[in-house]
Amino acid sequence: MDITLVIQIINMFVLMFLLNGVLYKPVKKILKERSEKLQGMRAEVSDYEKNAQLRQEEVDAKMAKASGKAKAALESARAEAQAAGDAKLTEIKAEADGEKKKQLADISAQFESAKKSLQENLDGFATEMASKILGRSL
């Protein structure tokens, strides 16, 4: 064992000390910072996902509410249209019934007028027919 061994041991400790200060600690520090940054990003991503999920739930709730309102408005419009249609149909039926009664009254009046006219001319027709049948005037 000579002095070179001791110098080599000292050289090794100095090299370890220098490498530790210059290379290992900065690399470990950078790796630790990256790990912390990565964990922070994962936490942010998790928060963003939670926020996105909450926003999606809010949008879904609003869509369901809007859909319900639209259905209610549609049903209301249908009911109003049905009521208006029923009212119009009733009005048309009443108008048609009135027109029917008017036409029946006109026909009845014409029938009575024709009946009266025929009744008045009945004696004249009977006499004329008897004359034709008998071949002489009565």
Image: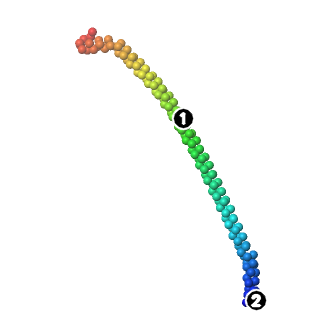
In the image: residue 23, left or right of residue 76: right
C-alpha separation, residue under disc 2 versus residue under disc 1? 111 Å
Under circle 2, the secondary element is helix
Q: In the image shown, does 46 or 88 lie closer to the viewer?
A: 46
Q: Residue furthest top?
A: 138
Q: In the image shown, does 97 or 128 lie closer to the viewer?
A: 97
x and y percentages locating residue 75 in the rendered image: 54, 38
Q: In the image shown, does 51 or 106 lie closer to the viewer?
A: 51
x and y percentages locating residue 20 in the rendered image: 73, 76
Query: 136 above or below 15?
Result: above
Q: Going from the N terminus, do you reach mark 2 or mark 1 first?
A: 2
In the image: residue 22, left or right of residue 105: right
Name the image quarter holding residue 123: top left
The residue singled out by tag 1 in the image is: 80
The residue singled out by tag 2 in the image is: 3
**The disc labelled 1 sits on which kind of residue?**
Glu
**The disc labelled 2 sits on which kind of residue?**
Ile
Quick one: label 2, few (<14), some, or many (20+) residues within 10 Å?
Answer: few
What residue appears at the point 48 percent right and 26 percent down from the top-left corner? Answer: 94
